[in-house]
Image (cartoon, helix red, strand yellow):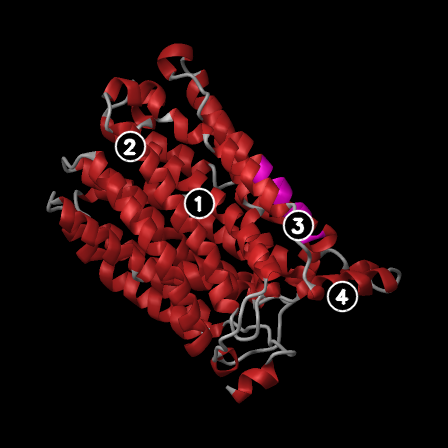
Amino acid sequence: MEPTPRTDEQQRGTRTVAVPPKQRRMVAGGAIGTLMEYYDYYLYGLASATVFPAVFFPNSNSTVGTLESFATFAFGFLLRPIGGLLFGHVGDRMGRKKALMMTVVGMGIVTAAIGLIPSADSIGVAAPILLLFFRMLQGLFVGGEMGGAASLVVEHAPVGRRGLFGALLISGAGVANVASAGFMAALGIGSEEFFMTWGWRIPFLFALVLAVIAVVLRSKLEESEEFKEHASNLRANQGKQAKRELPLKEVFRHPKNAVLGILIGLPQSIAGYVILTFGLAYMVSKGTQAQVGFIGTMIVGALQIVVAPLWGSLSDRIGRRTTYIGACVGFALLIYPTFALYQTDVAVLIWLGMVVGFVIPGVAMQGTLQTMLAEMFDVEARTTGVNIGYQISNTLGGGFAPLIATALTAAFDSVWPVVVYAAAIAVIGIVATAYASFRPDVENAPRLAEL
């Protein structure tokens, strides 16, 4: 359901209040799933750029092998919208908690399965087929994660702190960045033979440990009062409201925000995958050791843990729209300097490029987007609405970004087409954000107006 328009002024203002234990549990339960989502995808992206071409596509030259590897990376996004609809329906009809438990268990099992696939030298063409199969299953479960987590956390957020609470999910993504890159960097210190045979598999198997932790944390989750009230009203008016119970119908009853949500998410979706995933393959192709990229990704992740809440708090003060548009502009302007720094083959300058290109604009977009999407839909369709915007934009944008960027660089023997591509996506996000409307926080609006 499309909300009534909300001005940026209505979003502004923060109040310093203690966060009760219940709300801390909600944030922890939501963030652990976001951590797993990004851990799985960052890990797969790192492996796609450095390991999978040799392990699963050994008969291709380096460029073709990288393209084939990034193609499996892209295919994993195709089932994300389906997962978003499936688990969004579960979350809106049966509860956010139930959907979130399903997604973390599925993510853990499938990611670990990728780490058990034999190499192409052992089982031939079956190896890349299995890789593609499990990658697509990974996309299915990941597709249902953000909508439920964002809905749960935002619905539990205190007055004037939705942006901060939503951004804490992206702090979980920063932990995932550090963990995935840290694993790969630590295991890459040893012999190359061990790393390419067994070492790279260990981080994938570790996903099972994360899944167990997530199940424990999420077993303590509670539905928000807003959702409980909605569920109670549905039960009381079952006959009258039967035709309006399908969340997908509610989302597209007024399609403006459903479409704009997809377009808004495009710049955010490509930022990490162009700057970090393709960026790693790009610098390796220029002769830089993969270890430099792994360490840089760890640095980015560590900064992301701290910086994401700052961006979220800023959006509480100046508005989600203003923050996100500013981040899109920054992304368009900073992508070329980032790749110029990548070309230096100087570790410190490469790390600076990763920070400039991603921590400044990319984390700002990520730290704002999920709260902004949650505020674009009412409670009865919020999980589905967030999943549609987030997952379809990630499929159209992020999933194919490394593949597109690699193809553009190979075709033109220059990084400039990638810069133009990223800038064009940023413009789309700016226009869509300017025209979006946000759900007014009716309960909190009078208090926010006083701040």
- Residue at 54% across, 61% down: 259
Q: Secondary structure at mark 2?
A: helix
Displayed quadrant of residue 409:
top left
Percent coordinates x, y for residue 40 in the rendering:
45, 38
- Determine contact: label 4, label 3, CB under 8 Å: no
Q: Residues within 10 Å of mark 1 (few under 14, many from 20)?
A: many
Residue under label 2, please give it.
186
The reply to whether the magenta stretch includes residue 422 is no
Q: Mark 4 belongs to which amino acid?
A: Glu
Percent coordinates x, y for residue 62 in the rendering:
23, 27
N-term mark: 4 or 3:
3
**Magenta-colored span:** 95-105
Q: Nearer the viewer, residue 45 or 158?
A: 158
Residue under label 4, please give it.
229
On the picture, is 132 further left or further right than 148?
left
Question: Which labelled disc corresponds to residue 38?
Answer: 1
